[in-house]
């Protein structure tokens, strides 16, 4: 009996791990990067819902999708903070990760800042695209504009908090600005760190200035 | 004669079970301990909502695991914000130490899993891919009998020196999961444009490393584009071919190749914890522990 239960649980685990990994692979790699394709939408909503089944599946990682390794690293966002003194002179350039002491802390810091900005930028850009390319009613337009504004405000709030956090290690700064970049790969073989062009190509997405913030 | 042979096979099988279960328990608990200690004072800054409060975090991308949120709501109202994380951290460290030494192994594994889940896994914004493996590893330590062999439980309390037969399920679960992980990662990379085939994605991935010492190494490697192209192609092919590890004849070579790949990831990308947990999983799942006794 014990063995049968174990085999049944093992089978449930294998089927789910395969299903969710396949689903994510089809959705992210073959279907459409911006949307999400469900093989069995009802099953997905059943096991991902906010109910007891959903919680069990999430806690026991039965709905984990293992098809993302190596992809996340390639789509990086970077935030740089520039700190200035009272005369407007640049004192220090820093990243959010520099606010931490340990290597592990810096890595989590990178993850936090990149993911925060990337998810909010995605929301903002997706809203803008909807307004640009889809026919939407005036009510929908209003709601989308509201959502874009809200996401933008949250992004700025995050940037302010992160900047103030990093600023504790900088010292006597008067104001700072936060710049969000997308990192694009350079063409292989066309760079050289010693005197050549930069290894990273940055595409500036947004720049926010914070002049009067409480330290 | 047959009886002797059967006894010998049983001894070898038992030694193998004890070998991989105790290796898994010790490896996982040691890695988790190293990880939590390595944060030092940064731990509170990241995980206690010190910089970005948890409610603002969930407003941003809309997902803080409901179970974890309920736990925090309850804990905050009972012992306060700061104490919640302090107690969680110490409970986690103590239970990991107990798991490492094999004292009350299963309850220790359950506590370690709960603490790990609440600390690392509930907050989507700071959760990395390898957190799934860490959390799963502790879950498996709770579910399977990993307390036999090299444990104080075994030494003091148990006269049964046989590893439970159900411990083989641990190996099966790890094997299946690893095959799914590598094959789908390989497929994703293979279909992700030309980036993994012409070395561009390797270069972008290398930029993920923010360590200064590794940056110079990466810089010099970047001057040899062929290395990046070869690295990308070998990674994709190795991941796609991973299920071949089931063939005993080539198992050793596949295992060493995958371990070498993860050592490379640790050095180049500075993803030490991810590489270590994958190496532990691979060794537990496929290394021949028959000689272990």
Image (cartoon, coloured by chain):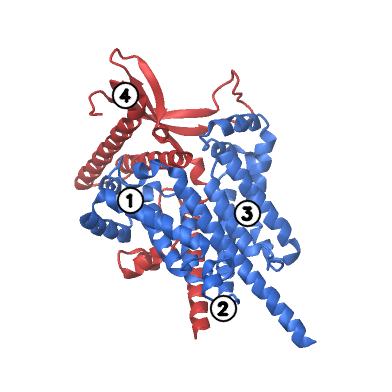
Chain colours: A red, B blue
Q: How far apart are the alpha carbons under marks 2 and 1?
A: 38 Å
Vertical relation: B198 (above or below) B277: above
State the SS at label 2.
loop
Q: Is residue A32 left or right of residue B190?
A: left
Task: Check disc 3 and report the residue beneath it.
Answer: B239
Q: Is residue A43 left or right of residue A212?
A: right
State the SS at label 3.
helix
Crowdedness near tag 2: few (<14), some (14–19) or many (≥20) residues, C-alpha within 10 Å? few
Q: How far apart are the alpha carbons under marks 2 and 4?
A: 66 Å
Task: Check disc 4 and report the residue beneath it.
Answer: A176
Q: How far apart are the alpha carbons under marks 4 and 1?
A: 33 Å
**From the viewer's perspective, is the residue at label 4 or at label 1 nearer?**
1
Vertical relation: B172 (above or below) B114: below
Residue at horizontal 61 percent and vertical 59 percent from the top: B282
Task: Check disc 1 and report the residue beneath it.
Answer: B86
Assess whether mark 1 and mark 3 are in contact (beta carbons under 8 angstroms).
no
Crowdedness near tag 4: few (<14), some (14–19) or many (≥20) residues, C-alpha within 10 Å? many
Q: How far apart are the alpha carbons under marks 3 and 2?
A: 43 Å
Check residue B159 in the rendering and tell me which mark sits there, or answer none.
Answer: 2
Residue at horizontal 61 percent and vertical 70 percent from the top: B18
Q: How far apart are the alpha carbons under marks 3 and 1?
A: 40 Å
For residue B165, what is the image quadrant? bottom right
Task: Using the image as rendered, state which of residue B134 and residue A62 is in the foreground.
Answer: B134
Chain identity of mark 2:
B
């Amino acid at each position: 009996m014990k063995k049968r239960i174990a085999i049944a649980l093992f089978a449930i685990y294998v089927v789910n791990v395969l299903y969710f990994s396949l689903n994510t692979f089809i959705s992210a790699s073959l279907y459409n990067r911006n949307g999400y394709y469900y093989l069995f939408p009802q099953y997905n909503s059943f096991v991902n819902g906010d109910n007891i089944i959903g919680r069990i599946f999430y806690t026991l990682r039965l709905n984990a999708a293992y098809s993302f390794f190596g992809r996340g690293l390639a789509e990086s966002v970077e935030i740089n903070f520039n700190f200035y003194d009272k005369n407007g002179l640049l004192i220090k350039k820093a990243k959010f990760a520099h606010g931490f002491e340990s290597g592990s802390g810096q890595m989590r810091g990178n993850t936090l800042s990149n993911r925060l900005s990337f998810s909010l930028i995605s929301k903002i850009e997706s809203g803008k695209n909807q307004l640009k390319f889809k026919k939407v009613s005036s009510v929908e337009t209003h709601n989308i504009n509201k959502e874009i504004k809200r996401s933008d405000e949250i992004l700025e709030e995050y940037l302010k908090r992160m900047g103030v956090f990093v600023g504790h290690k900088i010292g006597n700064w008067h104001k700072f600005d936060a710049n969000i970049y997308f990192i694009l790969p350079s063409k292989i073989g066309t760079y050289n760190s010693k005197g050549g062009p930069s290894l990273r190509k940055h595409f500036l997405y947004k720049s926010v200035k914070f002049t009067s913030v409480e330290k | 004669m047959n009886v002797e042979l059967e006894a010998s096979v049983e001894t070898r099988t038992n030694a193998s079970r004890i070998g991989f279960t105790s290796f898994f328990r010790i490896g996982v608990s040691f890695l988790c301990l190293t990880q939590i200690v390595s944060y030092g004072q940064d731990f509170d800054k990241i995980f206690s909502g010190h910089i970005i409060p948890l409610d603002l975090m969930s407003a941003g991308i809309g997902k803080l695991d409901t179970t974890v949120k309920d736990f925090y709501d309850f804990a905050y109202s009972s012992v306060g914000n700061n104490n919640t994380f302090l107690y969680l951290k110490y409970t986690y460290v103590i239970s990991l130490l107990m798991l490492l030494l094999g004292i009350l192994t299963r309850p220790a594994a359950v506590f370690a899993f709960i603490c790990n889940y609440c600390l690392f896994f509930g907050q989507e914004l700071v959760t990395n891919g390898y957190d799934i493996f860490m959390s799963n590893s502790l879950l498996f330590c709770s579910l399977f009998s990993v307390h036999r062999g090299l444990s104080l439980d075994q030494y003091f309390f148990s006269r049964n020196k046989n590893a439970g037969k159900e411990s083989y399920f641990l190996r099966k679960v790890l094997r299946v999961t690893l095959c799914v992980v590598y094959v789908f990662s390989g497929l994703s990379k293979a279909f992700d444009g030309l980036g993994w085939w012409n070395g561009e994605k390797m270069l972008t991935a290398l930029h993920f490393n923010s360590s200064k010492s590794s940056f110079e190494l990466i810089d010099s490697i970047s001057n040899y584009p062929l290395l990046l192209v070869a690295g990308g192609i070998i990674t994709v092919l190795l991941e796609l071919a991973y299920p071949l590890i089931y063939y005993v004849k080539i198992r050793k070579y596949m295992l060493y190749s995958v371990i070498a790949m993860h050592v490379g990831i640790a050095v180049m990308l500075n993803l030490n914890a991810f590489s270590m947990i994958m190496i532990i999983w691979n060794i537990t799942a496929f290394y021949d522990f028959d000689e272990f006794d």
